[in-house]
Amino acid sequence: MSHMWTFQRVGGLDQVVFKNADDIINLPNLDPKLWVALSCPTTGLDFDERTLALLDSDKDGRIRIPDILDAISWTQQRIVSFKSILASSQTLPISQIDTSCEQGKKLSVTAHSILASLGKSQSDYLTQEDVQQSIKINAGKLYNGDLIFPPSAELSSEMQTFIQTAINTTGAKKDMSGQDGIDLDIAKTFVENLKTWQKWQTDISHTQTPFGENQAEIWKLVQTLKPKIDDYFLRVALAQYAPQAQGALNVDEKYIVPTENGLLSDEALAELPLSKIDTVSALDLVNGLNPLWKAKISRFKTLVASELANPDQLTQQEWLNIQNSLEAYTSLITAKPEMAQADVTTKPTSSLEDIPNQLINSLASSDLLTAFEQMVEQDNKTPISASDVLVLEKLVLFHKHLYRLLVNFASFADFFSLEKRAAFQLGKLYIDGRCATLCVAVDNIAKHSNMANYSELCLLYCECTRHDQKQLIAAAMTAGQGDLLIEGRNGVFIDNNGNDWDANVVKMITKPISIQQAIWAPYQRIGRLITEQINKWATSKDADIEKSSAQVLQSPENKFDIGKSVGIFAAIGLAIGAIGTALATLFQAIFSLSWWQFPLVFIGLFLIISGPSVILAWLKLRRRTLGPLLEASGWAINGQVKINFLLGKLLTSKAELPKNAKRNLRDPLKSQNKKSMMILLCAIVFGIGITAGWLWYQGDFQRYFEQPQAQSTQNGQQEENNHYR
């Protein structure tokens, strides 16, 4: 509580600033509510994968606050000072290893041994590459300090058999080279299971039955034949009870028919009764047997002949006596002992039942376990111990990456920095003359978009392919316009390793992108509406003209009606007159204004048309947040983490010419005649408009339209009077 923290208000959140080593050491005392993130996934990040694997000690695929605090505590116990961690150095000075304890001294010795084995005896620091190279070199050695031995050819054939049998029946662990092997715990468990199995088999062999050494084979035959023999005696009892049902209890010939290939089905025959059913109680062990069971019955007959009154027949009582004589043996067989389990990463593929008894007795009674213990002891004395190398690897990785993890978890300093990128930013998407740098990983687009929609960001979901690889990303467009951003467009995604991927937009969440887009959006909508209406009107008129032309061609009697034509021309004239009057009124109102009122008119029109769109876009752009976007990717975020206008422009850059570039506005592929004609047409329209406005202002234009109208009214009244006369 006495530590003085420093916070910076960024993105609408108070974010902790790591200024010195004390800030990291005291991080366990910081309220978790003041951390920007509470948890994040171990995948889909631009971060060292090995470091994430070491942080995820419980292997649940997530990094949480306790995992980071444990990493800080673990590192603090093995390093002299946290000052070097703030620099995210690529190297770990050996002098930074705390040698005040035995473990630290051992790590220091291991570090020097690694450097010596790599020919860097004069070096006083370790890198991640040094440790990984040492692991790779030692992985090929039998005695490499990992205390795990695969069935290597360097070992004796007996030891190879011992290790391989243990792997098959007990399980294995991966050694430094990635091979399956066993450690001392697996070896002891294996030998313990061998002895347990051996004792069980001895107890079984000492069980007294009338069948002597054949009891095991007889017991297996009894278990196999029991369903069929019991079924036979049941059918005989039913035949004796209801003789009329004897035919139904036997095999109907319709069941003994060839299959499509002309052969009898073994599966179908095996399901049929064991022998012909009649009222005779004894089972004939020689004649009338189901062919598929005859061999087993014959072997059974040979083994139990001493228990049968008639060696060719088996009565129901004799069958029961045989089973009763095997009860003790059966009880012992079914009481199979539980085998001990060892801590393994590779599960066993077989059981001790699959191993010959001779091999079991040999492995259990030999001194192979003692020899294996001596191998482990020798491996433990290796100068470069695998366990110590792994500890050094962890220390080097935490020394290198821990600070970057903190500024991407406890705070988002890297995201709000202008020079760095956050751990969740996977690369850059180039599309529509823009570059989007806020690109995050996506597992399921439908699920991701439901949550990401609340971020108020315009998102492009892209399927990126490179050779035979695929990945899904969501890219936020935070600058420019979105007119040409549609599903199906193609772009290029450049990941942080510089690899380019073909990107195809498969889904889009449409949101306001910029104020510029909001300004022109109403005019674009009006333009599209006018275009659509003109297209509809032109299409309908074209259809009407085609229909009228067809009617005229089909009816040659129709003659040209001059009266109707005059009426049409008069209507057209009146329409033109109305338009002219409207234009004259408009120009009269405009020219009646003072010069300083003209800008106010245009500003007012702009506010009326674009104002609502700009206000709505401004409100939505102010609500843009990073939180829901990361939440959809598996993060747990405290607060919203707002994206303001300045950050939005930085996250998406538009195409701009270089500062020293020159622009030639003359387009050689553009027709100059069309350009001249357009200029001339605009000038004529503008001149007519100015003239009409000036005439109206002087009063002549109004009189020009009022006189014909009055004359027309007078002529109409005179014609009406003549009609009444």
Image: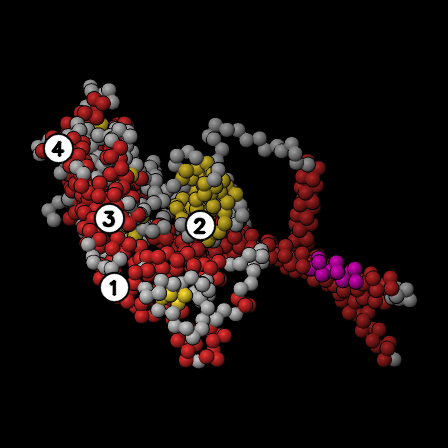
Residue that mark 4 sits on: 104
The location of residue 170, given as percent across then percent down, is: 25, 46
The amino acid beneath tag 4 is Gly
Earlier sequence position, callout 4 versus callout 1: 4
Q: Nearer the viewer, residue 57 or 583?
A: 57
Residue that mark 3 sits on: 58
Earlier sequence position, callout 3 versus callout 1: 3
The crowding category of the residue bearing disc 1, from other C-alpha atoms within 10 Å (few below 14, some 14 to 19, many at least 20), is some
Residue that mark 1 sits on: 325
Earlier sequence position, callout 2 versus callout 1: 1
In what element is the residue under mark 1?
Answer: helix
Q: Is residue 618 visible?
A: no
In what element is the residue under mark 2?
Answer: strand
Outermost right residue:
557
Asked whether the beta carbons under mark 2 and mark 3 sit within 8 Å of each other, the answer is no
The location of residue 568, given as percent across then percent down, is: 79, 64
284 over 2 or under it: above or below: below
674 with respect to 564 (left or right) = left
Residue at image x 24%, y 20%?
A: 119
Q: Nearer the viewer, residue 556 or 719?
A: 556
Between marks 4 and 1, how big is the CA–CA gap?
A: 68 Å
Q: Is residue 115 visible?
A: yes
The location of residue 704, given as percent across then percent down, is: 74, 59
101 with respect to 663 (left or right) = left
Residue that mark 2 sits on: 459
Q: Nearer the viewer, residue 307 or 208?
A: 307
Q: Is residue 544 magenta?
A: yes
Q: Nearer the viewer, mark 3 or mark 1?
A: 1
Between marks 3 and 1, how big is the CA–CA gap?
A: 54 Å
196 over 429 or under it: above or below: below
The amino acid beneath tag 3 is Asp
The crowding category of the residue bearing disc 2, from other C-alpha atoms within 10 Å (few below 14, some 14 to 19, many at least 20), is many
